[in-house]
Image (spheres, rainbow, N blue to C red):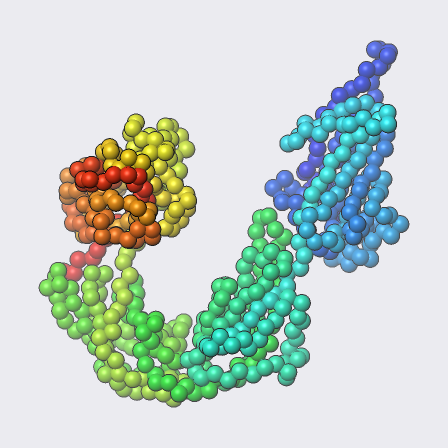
């Protein structure tokens, strides 16, 4: 039986005493109090086949009863956490009981009600989160409380598997039962190495919020995506894997239910050439190695470094050279990729290409990797140095003059600002995260306005260097603004002017510029300005949004 040491939702004592003719006698003590074995922070949720316990702690009641809905059952006390609850059903009770404790087995999905109804001689009330007043009926005072319990049913994984031509190979409903014992009857799909299958999660019951696919010999080996495209590169015959439907969180009962994918996959050698995978491309890693993909799983190889050429061009540094490759190995986590380690460091301002002259690299299905030349390497820039999300307009102002702060933590828009005009934090139209900043002026560009980021260089300043400064911007359809600018009190570089006339309307666009600065002290301001002088002839309502202000340090090649 559930332990009432956990009782917390207990209605507090509040009572109104009736008048007694003999004022020297104390009135009868009355108290409407009851509880449920859930903590205050727990949502009132459970699962079909689970039980909750309710207790009447009232005093002085003339009568008392619990009332449940049809389909649910009362249990005898004494059951344990691992007991089969149907064995404890009290068939002598219907939907009502006058027992002090009510142990309710929930068998209905959805919202279920449990009501306590007590009668008293005198009027009384409960002043909790919601006041409950007794109502007089047939000469007694009746007080009721109803708990609404959200009862979740079992998760029932459902899914489809499709081939590269979008043909449905397997369709499994939530009601379908799948067992490995039936594997001899499962469909068999024959695919070439390098082909992919698509797995689609169709689970609806009962309110899943996640899933986990596990794929045998697939690439990827697992996925949490609702639709997962999985490539196969290893030759052989094997079962497809499984899906696990997941429901987890503070306001739902946790549950995980797995179901096998009833499909046998036979991977045969590919009829396609073994080539550089242009879809995946090549990537410069943080450790200056280069990773690129090919269209098949790679057989272990040695002595291929001389077959690769890496060319690096950095115009600003006057650099144009081939950098020797000192190691070429299969990627440790993905056997369809090769890692190249170079003899010299690379920089995020380099333009890098790789070439392969051909050699002895083969796929596991015995295809030879074809030569390729001048494939571009994607260079990932360093992280935004403005690490506090408030500079990207994420954090709301909570103190001070919210309007003059434009609703933003860290920013100041001055006295002329208004929530319905000029700058203000917005959560309706965002590029990333949960907020952006909106500029709105119904009268064209009728006033010079400035949004100032105070202390944007805090707490330690900004080192000297070249920085890629960027925003995501959104101009509403009909916007005819020409320009905005950034000013500062750094004393290290001038205004940054941004052209808006050439940008599309009605969509988010990233804009960026490179600036060079000496060291910027801590506590300096960075301003976003919309001024009349930059927008001559602009009339009518103008609406624009900024998001994701970013400063990224660009590495200078010596």
- In the displayed structure, 224 sits above or below 500; it is below
Residue drawn at 30 percent across, 65 percent down: 285
Q: Nearer the viewer, residue 304 or 499?
A: 499
Picture quadrant of residue 301: bottom left
Q: At which x and y percent is residue 322?
A: 16, 73
Q: Quadrant of residue 493?
A: top left
Which residue is at the front of the view, 475 or 31?
A: 475
**Front-most of residues 485 and 119:** 485
The residue at the point 28 percent across, 56 percent down is 382
Left or right of 92, for residue 273: left
Residue 209 showing in the rendered view: yes
Image check: 329 left or right of 464?
right
Horizontal side of residue 440 vs 95, given as left or right: left
Give the image quarter of residue 175. Answer: bottom right
x and y, in percent, of residue 166 in the image: 49, 75
**Residue 301 visible to an observer of this rendering:** no
Count how many numbered circles sit on residues in the image.
0
């Amino acid at each position: 039986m559930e332990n009432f040491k956990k009782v917390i939702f207990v209605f507090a004592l509040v009572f109104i005493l009736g008048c007694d003719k003999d004022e020297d006698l104390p009135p009868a003590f009355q108290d409407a109090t009851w509880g449920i074995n859930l903590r205050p922070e727990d949502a009132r949720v459970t699962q079909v086949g689970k039980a909750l316990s309710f207790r009447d702690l009232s005093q002085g009641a003339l009568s008392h009863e619990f009332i449940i809905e049809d389909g649910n059952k009362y249990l005898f006390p004494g059951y344990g956490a691992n007991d089969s609850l149907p064995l404890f059903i009290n068939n002598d009770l219907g939907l009502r009981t006058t027992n002090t404790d009510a142990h309710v087995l929930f068998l209905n999905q959805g919202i279920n009600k449990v009501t306590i109804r007590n009668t008293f001689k005198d009027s009384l009330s409960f002043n909790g989160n919601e006041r409950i007043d007794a109502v007089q009926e047939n000469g007694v005072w009746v007080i009721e409380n109803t708990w609404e319990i959200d009862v979740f049913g079992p998760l029932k994984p459902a899914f489809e598997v499709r081939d590269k031509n979008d043909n449905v190979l397997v369709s499994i409903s939530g009601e379908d039962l799948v067992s490995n014992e039936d594997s001899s009857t499962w469909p068999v799909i024959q695919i070439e190495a390098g082909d992919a299958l698509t797995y689609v999660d169709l689970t609806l019951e009962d309110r899943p919020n996640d899933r986990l696919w596990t794929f045998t010999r697939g690439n990827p080996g697992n996925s949490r995506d609702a639709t997962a495209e999985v490539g196969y590169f290893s030759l052989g015959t094997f079962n497809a894997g499984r899906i696990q439907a997941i429901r987890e969180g503070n306001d739902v009962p946790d549950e995980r239910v797995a179901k096998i994918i009833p499909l046998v996959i036979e991977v045969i050698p590919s009829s396609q050439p073994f080539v550089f995978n242009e879809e995946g491309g090549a990537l410069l890693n943080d450790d200056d190695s280069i990773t690129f993909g090919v269209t098949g799983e790679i057989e272990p190889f040695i002595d291929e470094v001389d077959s690769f050429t890496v060319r690096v061009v950095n115009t600003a540094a006057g650099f144009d050279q081939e950098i020797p490759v000192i190691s070429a190995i299969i990627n440790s986590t993905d056997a369809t990729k090769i890692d190249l380690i170079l003899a010299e460091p690379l920089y995020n301002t380099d333009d890098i290409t790789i070439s392969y002259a051909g050699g002895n690299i083969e796929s596991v299905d015995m295809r030879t990797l074809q030569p390729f030349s001048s494939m571009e390497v994607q260079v990932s820039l360093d992280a935004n140095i403005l690490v506090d999300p408030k500079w990207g307009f994420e954090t709301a102002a909570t103190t001070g003059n919210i309007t003059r702060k434009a609703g933003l933590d860290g920013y100041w828009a001055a006295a002329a600002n208004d929530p319905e005009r000029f700058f203000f934090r917005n959560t309706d139209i965002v590029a990333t995260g949960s907020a952006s900043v909106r500029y709105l002026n119904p009268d064209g560009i009728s006033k010079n306005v400035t949004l100032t980021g105070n202390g944007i260089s805090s707490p330690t300043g900004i080192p000297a260097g070249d920085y890629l400064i960027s925003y995501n911007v959104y101009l509403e359809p009909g916007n005819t603004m020409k320009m905005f600018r950034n000013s500062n009190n750094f004393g290290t570089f001038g205004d940054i002017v941004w052209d808006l006339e050439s940008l599309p309307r009605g969509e988010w666009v990233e804009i960026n510029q490179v600036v060079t600065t000496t060291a910027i002290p801590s506590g300096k301001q960075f301003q976003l300005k919309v001024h009349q002088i930059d927008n001559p002839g602009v009339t009518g309502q103008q609406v624009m949004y900024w998001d994701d202000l970013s400063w990224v340090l660009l590495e200078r090649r010596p």
